[in-house]
Amino acid sequence: MVEGSPWRDIRLRRAANLAIDRKGMKELLGGMMVEGAGLVPPGHPWHGTPRDPVTSDKAAARKLMAEAGFGPRNPLRTKVAISTSGSGQMQPLTMNEAVQQDLKEIGIEVTFEVLEWNALLGIWREGAKAPSNRGVSAINISYGAFDPFTFAIRFLKTDMVPPAANNWGYFSDPAYDALMTRIYETFEPGPQELLLQELHAKAVDDRLFLFVAHDMNPRATSARVKGFVQAQSWFQDLTPITLG
């Protein structure tokens, strides 16, 4: 959301999300993903009910691009920071190139600033205004939603801009801030969950991110392994496991 970023225009954020062929991406990954529908997948306790669920529609995307002043003869050119591997990403280069092709079809021409994983984390932590970003307007970081802070607050609260936390893009909105303050002040799980659903639905409706895929975290185990239960988490309980 820094001055000069194309993504300040919600029409462009919506167009980019409409352009993504999530079914094709799922086929590319052998079915090992859930189509991107937000920061957390449908069925997650914090997903909520967005008024404008994430869909794919390239014709609608091109219409929004034209309304914003872009098209085949006047494409939007932008640069995105990505990494070649790291942090449990699925197939980052292949996936980023598929997204790049989808966006090109609606008039968004993306070039990549390709970095080693820890270097990417470095510019993420420094924020979009830092010289180290070198004209990057978006950044592709994998993450997990462990608690309300890691789920969304660190990305969206005004006072979470670098160096405080991970609001890389300097997003700032009083309505979001007020909602997140209420989340901080609510300690009963039920009421807090409702507020988190409201926050997530709002972020999806405003298309604050490009939603592509939810990783299913596939694992293969020997037939000798007994008692393993796959958790929907980056953390796994190993205590019930035995070897037969």
Image (spheres, helix red, strand yellow):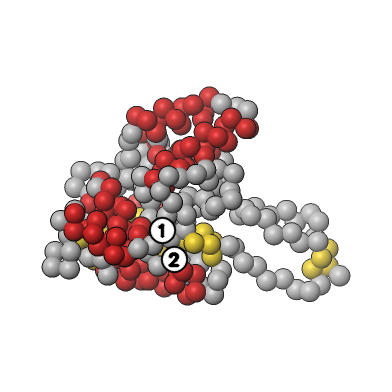
Residue density around tag 2, few if under 14, some if 14–19, many if 20 or more, within 10 Å: many
For the point 47% across and 54% down, the residue is 37
Against 19, is 205 above or below? above
Residue behind mark 1: 55
Of residues 94 and 70, the one nearer the viewer is 70
Against 131, is 32 above or below? below
User: Given the current orientation, which residue lies at the most extreme top position?
Assistant: 185
Q: Secondary structure at mark 1?
A: loop
Instruction: Tell whether 29 sits left or right of 8.
Output: right
Kindly tell me whether residue 60 is visible in this rendering: yes
Q: Nearer the viewer, mark 2 or mark 1?
A: 1
Instruction: Tell whether 25 sits left or right of 194.
Output: left
Residue 14 in picture, x, y percent from top left: 32, 53
For the point 55% across and 35% down, the residue is 194
First in sequence, mark 2 or 1: give its number.
2
> How far separated are the C-alphas under marks 2 and 1?
9 Å
Q: Secondary structure at mark 2?
A: helix
Residue 219 in picture, x, y percent from top left: 65, 68
* Quadrant housing residue 202: top left
Type of the residue with mark 2 = Arg
Instruction: Tell whether 227 sits left or right of 135.
Output: right
Give the total number of marks visible in the rendering.
Answer: 2
